[in-house]
Amino acid sequence: MDNQFGEGTKIIWKDRKRWCGLPWSFTRYYIVEKEGSWLKLFTSIGFLNINGEELNIYRIYDISVQTTLSNRIFGTGTITLHCSSNSVDQVFLIRIKHPYKVRALLQELIEKERAKKGTSLGEFTY
């Protein structure tokens, strides 16, 4: 599939930041896979001037979900991704639809990528 992320890439998941459950914003989120090569999370914010960031999925080490009462009414929530990236420590997927399903998808993809790359997250005890 040829798309904005280049030839040979496939969008696994995409959504937008929502307001009252409706995607009325210019903040977009994508999980993209390039066959046999990489799996990344892309964020794109803006209309005229677009600020985009990307994060390798295997660099995420913790995920949390926050849902307020209004989020639960509209079926949305915010996912916080804690990561070991040089550019960012946290990535927020703000008011996305079905946050618990997305969290489960991310957890599955993270484990798959770590197994493929042979990396693991070490726990430190003192």
Image: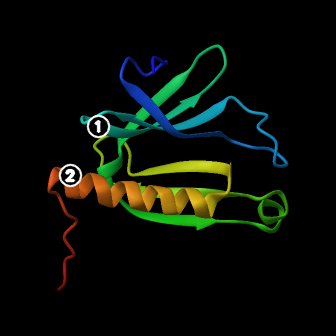
The residue pinned by badge 2 equals 116
Is residue 7 visible to the viewer in this orientation of the structure? yes
The image quarter in which residue 9 lies: top left
Q: In this rendered view, identify the residue nearer to me: 50 or 21.
A: 21
Circle 1 is placed at which residue position? 38
Residue 109 place in picture, x, y as percent: 38, 54
- Position of 48 with respect to 36 (left or right) is right
Residue type pointed to by label 2 = Lys
Q: SS class of the residue under badge 2?
A: helix
Q: Is residue 9 above or below residue 88?
A: above
Q: Is residue 39 above or below residue 45?
A: below
**Other-residue count near label 2 (Cα within 10 Å), few / some / many at <14 / 14–19 / ≥20:** few
Q: CA distance from mark 1 to mark 2?
A: 10 Å
Quadrant containing the C terminus is: bottom left
Which residue in the rendered view is the most extreme toward the left?
118
- Give residue 106's quadrant in the image: bottom left
CB within 8 Å, label 1 to label 2: no
User: Residue placed at 52% from the left, 61% from the top?
Assistant: 103
